[in-house]
Image: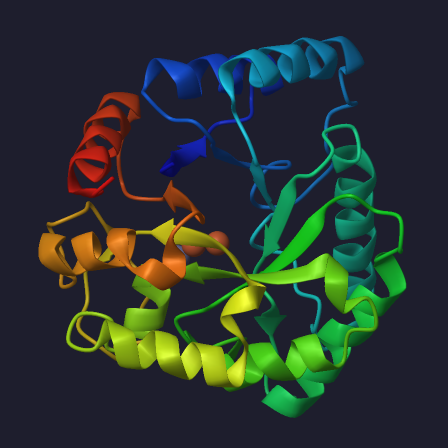
Amino acid sequence: MLKIGCHLSSAKGYLSMGREAVKIGANTFQFFTRNPRGGKAKALDLEDVAAYRQFAEEQGLSPILAHAPYTLNACAASEDLRTFAKETMADDLQRLEHIPGSLYNFHPGSHVKQGAETGIRLIAAQLNEILWSEQSTTVLLETMAGKGSEVGRSFEEIAAILEQVDLQGKMGVCLDTCHVFDGGYDIVGSLDAVLGEFDRVVGLGKLRAIHLNDSMNPLGSHKDRHQKLGEGSLGLEALERVVNHPALRGLPFYLETPNDLEGYAREIALVKQLYRT
Ligand code: FE
Ligand code: FE
Ligand code: ZN
């Protein structure tokens, strides 16, 4: 079955997101765990969580993808910033235990002139401090476009982080179609080859979610500007091949395209049309 959803605002809580998802034809969704620019999360409303869990069960909404604030930098040069990233992610993971079996996605970080190798080591060290063996959430590294000094710009960098994490069973990868294309992986011209390379370097078994976005920029641009499906440099035919690729079957797809709710409803209907059952 096709698992499709989009990014929703978490301002009104879980039940509200669940209702919104169902209203626009989604059967999963993504949300920021707190203000995307960081900062303190609101106290968890346990009644809202309980109501959401019952609603999600009835409607078959799962798994949901919590996205860490994108300002966190697990490999910042300053120890204070690294500690802030660590404490925020640890807190997010504690809270997510209230919704068992969720996914938690984060941008690995920016090494800011320390070099990718140092960045990779710091990110893995941080994960080793916050993961625990009984947690029910799977933590995903997002593939990045390679803007500035972003770590995770290549499959090799993603694999290098994963290799240094002790609790590998708690880790996975979220592949963003805009990011990998901007990162230089030609998923338009040679999707099979790119996924084959991902399998050799990281392992397709690690892939747990797809961010389904078109891109405003050409292959290898390292820009990271998302576009509506079919209106960017990937195009609908390439996205149709992504949605139907046998290696990606069964993975949840999340739209992060520039859309309001109505636009998302239309794109979700479009992806359902593209998907061959
Ligand atoms: Fe992201
Ligand atoms: Fe993304
Ligand atoms: Zn992006």
Type of colouring:
rainbow
Estimate the x, y position of residue 2 in percent, counting from the top left: 36, 38
Estimate the x, y position of residue 258 in percent, counting from the top left: 27, 41
Residue under the image location 22 percent in, 39 percent down: 271
The quadrant of the picture showing ligand 3 is bottom left
Outermost residue, front side: 277
Nearer to us in this view, 133 or 249: 249
Estimate the x, y position of residue 196 in percent, counting from the top left: 37, 80
Residue 122 position by quadrant:
bottom right
Taking the image as shown, residue 108 lies to the left or right of residue 44, namely left
Number of dots carrying numbers: 0
Taking the image as shown, residue 88 lies to the left or right of residue 151, namely right
Residue under the image location 75 percent in, 68 percent down: 168
| Vertical position of residue 85 compared to residue 38: above or below | below
Residue under the image location 26 percent in, 32 percent down: 268
Estimate the x, y position of residue 11 in percent, counting from the top left: 56, 22
Residue under the image location 66 percent in, 91 percent down: 117
Nearer to us in this view, 182 or 52: 52
Point out the image quarter for the C terminus. Answer: top left
Taking the image as shown, residue 191 lies to the left or right of residue 196, namely left
Residue 68 visible at all: no
Residue 145 visible at all: yes
| Vertical position of residue 143 compared to residue 200: above or below | above
Point out the image quarter for the N terminus. Answer: top left
